[in-house]
């Protein structure tokens, strides 16, 4: 037995000696028939384990998980942080009441400005309050908007090669919901500001009567949907119109959105580019203008990555802040349900409707009460000046193109000049350990839920990239999972020490803009861990450690592809993130680019 590496206790790590190491993932990039052959070898009894062992060794996973002494115990204490200058929300109250309270936290709606025809030459997304104003003013009805949306969705489903936004869609069900909403407006009794608002639901969240397939071809056969997920039921009680189940990377186990089962959703800004994943359909349907918002899930950046690549806003809440019951993955420790929308205020309205912890998590996590920022108050704006923003420069700049880091840096400089936010240089140790701990945690929890179906023969019906992940995840043992949890506790210590010095950690959301789709990847998928590394570079901490995080669009690269800025907050600090994200959004004064695939469904003439 070789000599083991012994880590010093987390509290004794000398940050001045920490040197940033650029991430270098050792794995082949495979597509097409070559990828198919690779997976066949991977699933061969003698050869497969040798390949997996080699890849784990090359990426130093065996050294870390099996040949390292980690002094921390595999238990994390519940952490509670309170926010100041915010409005407390009753998570046990009615969702429509929370949405009404969120409305009062927004600046007054200026109909004259929003509907000014002089602004027609510059592109903007219609917001939820624009739809509500149009309905109340009888410019349009929800049924009229539905008739704009339905043929476009049907057109996407007929494209060759297929590139659907939705996996499950029922035009008559949409018409039925829209008619009910139209009637409420005609009677002068809309339920809330969300009444008549069109929202898509990711295919791993239950939306009755649609099946939840997780973008597989078989999950609905073993897991029938009997009722809405809790988050969906809360939106339904507010009068939301659900358009259907949005496309995604199969089982959420990928960062691009590639899906050979139903077709790969395309980036509305460039149809030859990926949306990012795994919430590919939710981000694309919002960016294309067809829906005001969507619900996604985020276990490894799956809300923030596609939001960044598609140029929209995506919120990953603190773990336990939203009730994940009714999701395919409502059993683990890294995944949450969260909103995607075209603006911060729309994200805030949807978030207000869906928030509320499960009873068990109120006991185990001891969350502070949910809060919203009062964006209508001058005190809220003044609070920005006291914020300290932490930036780990070496990490921040580890991107594929300097377009990404420079654009995000420009926004941070603008924040400092305009609001007086203080930039603080920080060091985050053990980033490689964090990536490994996250992979083992999410992989072990995923495979634990799927083993019965794999043993029952369903594994061969998965995509080839999912089967690659299954091969890796099945190689993790109990000692690997325990080691990952010990690392998790260390990393929580490091980050909570950082949060004593700063209020928010700032990074680019992704280390690259939307990658190109290779035609050879459409039929069999692909494995490209180098691209996955760039896309996931900055998002993992929020999932492994449960922190809230948000992605906001801040510009474009030289090819016109969107770039997102990520804000990571303390546990339960959603209100601070929403306030800062709103300021970022307001400061981005340059006109937004109209996506190449965009539809104005709120036509009033």
Image (cartoon, rainbow, N blue to C red):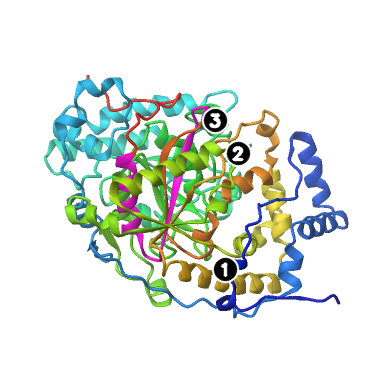
* Residue behind mark 3: 163
Q: CA distance from mark 3 to mark 2?
A: 10 Å
Query: Height in image: 383 above or below 481?
Result: above
Within-10-Å neighbours for mark 2: few <14, some 14–19, many 20+? many
> Which numbered disc flags the more N-terminal residue, 3 or 2?
3
Q: Which mark is residue 362?
A: none
Q: Quadrant of residue 181?
A: top left
C-alpha gap between disc 1 and disc 2: 39 Å
Please state which of the two labelled residues, at mark 3 or mark 2, is closer to the viewer.
Answer: 2
Real-space Cα separation, disc 3 to disc 1, in angstroms? 47 Å
Of residues 564 and 473, the one drawn nearer to the viewer in this rendering: 564
Q: Which residue is mark 2?
A: 258
Q: Secondary structure at mark 3?
A: loop
Of the residues under marks 1 and 2, which one precedes in the sequence?
A: 1
Residue at image point 87% right, 54% down: 47
Task: Return the residue at label 1.
Answer: 15
Residue 506 counted in the magenta span: no
Q: How many marks?
A: 3
Magenta segment boundaries in residue numbering? 558-587
């Amino acid at each position: 037995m070789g000599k083991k590496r012994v880590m010093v206790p987390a509290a004794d790590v000398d940050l001045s000696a920490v040197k940033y190491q650029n991430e270098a993932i050792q794995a082949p990039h495979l597509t097409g028939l070559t990828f198919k052959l690779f997976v066949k070898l991977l699933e061969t009894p003698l050869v497969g384990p040798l390949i997996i062992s080699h890849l784990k060794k090359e990426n130093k996973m065996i050294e870390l998980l099996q040949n390292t002494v980690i002094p921390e115990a595999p238990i994390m204490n519940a952490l509670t942080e309170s926010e100041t200058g915010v409005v407390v929300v009753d998570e046990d109250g009615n969702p429509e009441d929370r949405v009404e309270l969120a409305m009062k936290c927004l600046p007054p709606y200026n109909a004259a400005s929003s509907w000014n025809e002089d602004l027609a030459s510059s592109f903007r997304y219609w917001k939820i309050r624009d739809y509500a104003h149009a309905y109340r003013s009888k410019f349009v009805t929800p049924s009229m908007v539905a008739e704009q949306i339905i043929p476009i969705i049907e057109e996407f489903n007929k494209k060759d090669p297929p590139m659907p936004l939705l996996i499950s869609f029922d035009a008559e069900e949409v018409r039925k919901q829209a008619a009910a909403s139209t009637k409420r407006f005609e009677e002068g009794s809309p339920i809330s500001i969300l009444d008549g608002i069109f929202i898509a639901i990711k295919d791993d969240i239950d939306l009755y009567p649609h099946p939840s397939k997780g973008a597989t071809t078989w999950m609905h056969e073993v897991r029938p949907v009997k009722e809405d997920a809790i988050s969906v039921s809360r939106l339904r009680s507010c009068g939301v119109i659900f358009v259907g189940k949005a496309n995604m990377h199969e089982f959420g186990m990928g960062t691009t959105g590639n899906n050979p089962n139903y077709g790969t959703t395309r980036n509305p800004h460039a149809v030859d580019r990926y949306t990012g994943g795994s919430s590919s359909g939710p981000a694309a349907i919002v960016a294309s203008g067809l829906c005001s918002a969507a619900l996604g899930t985020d276990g490894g950046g799956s809300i923030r990555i596609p939001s960044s690549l598609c140029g929209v806003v995506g919120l990953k809440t603190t773990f336990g802040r939203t009730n994940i019951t009714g999701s395919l993955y409502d059993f683990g420790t890294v995944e949450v349900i969260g909103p995607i929308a075209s603006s911060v205020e729309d994200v805030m309205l949807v978030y207000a409707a869906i928030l509320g912890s499960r009873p068990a998590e109120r006991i185990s996590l001891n969350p502070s009460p949910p809060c919203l920022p009062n964006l209508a108050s001058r005190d809220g704006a003044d609070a920005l000046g006291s914020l300290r923003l932490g930036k780990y420069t070496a990490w921040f700049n580890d991107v594929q193109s300097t377009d990404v880091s420079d654009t995000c840096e420009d926004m941070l400089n603008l924040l400092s000049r305009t609001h007086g936010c203080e930039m603080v240089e920080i060091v985050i140790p053990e980033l490689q350990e964090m990536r490994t701990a996250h992979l083992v945690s999410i992989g072990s929890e995923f495979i634990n839920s799927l083993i019965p179906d794999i043993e029952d023969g369903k594994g061969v019906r998965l995509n080839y990239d999912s089967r690659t992940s299954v091969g890796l995840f099945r190689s993790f043992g109990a000692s690997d999972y325990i080691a990952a949890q010990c690392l998790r506790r260390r990393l929580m210590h490091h980050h909570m020490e950082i949060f004593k010095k700063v209020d928010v950690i700032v990074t680019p959301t992704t280390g690259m803009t939307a990658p190109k789709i290779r035609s050879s990847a459409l039929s069999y998928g692909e494995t490209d861990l180098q691209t996955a590394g760039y896309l996931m570079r900055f998002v993992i901490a929020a999932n492994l450690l449960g922190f809230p995080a948000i992605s906001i669009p801040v510009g474009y690269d030289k090819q016109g592809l969107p770039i997102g800025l990520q804000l990571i907050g303390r546990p339960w600090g959603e209100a601070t993130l929403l306030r800062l994200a709103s300021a970022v959004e307001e400061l981005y004064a340059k006109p937004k680019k109209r996506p190449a695939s965009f539809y104005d469904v709120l036509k009033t003439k």
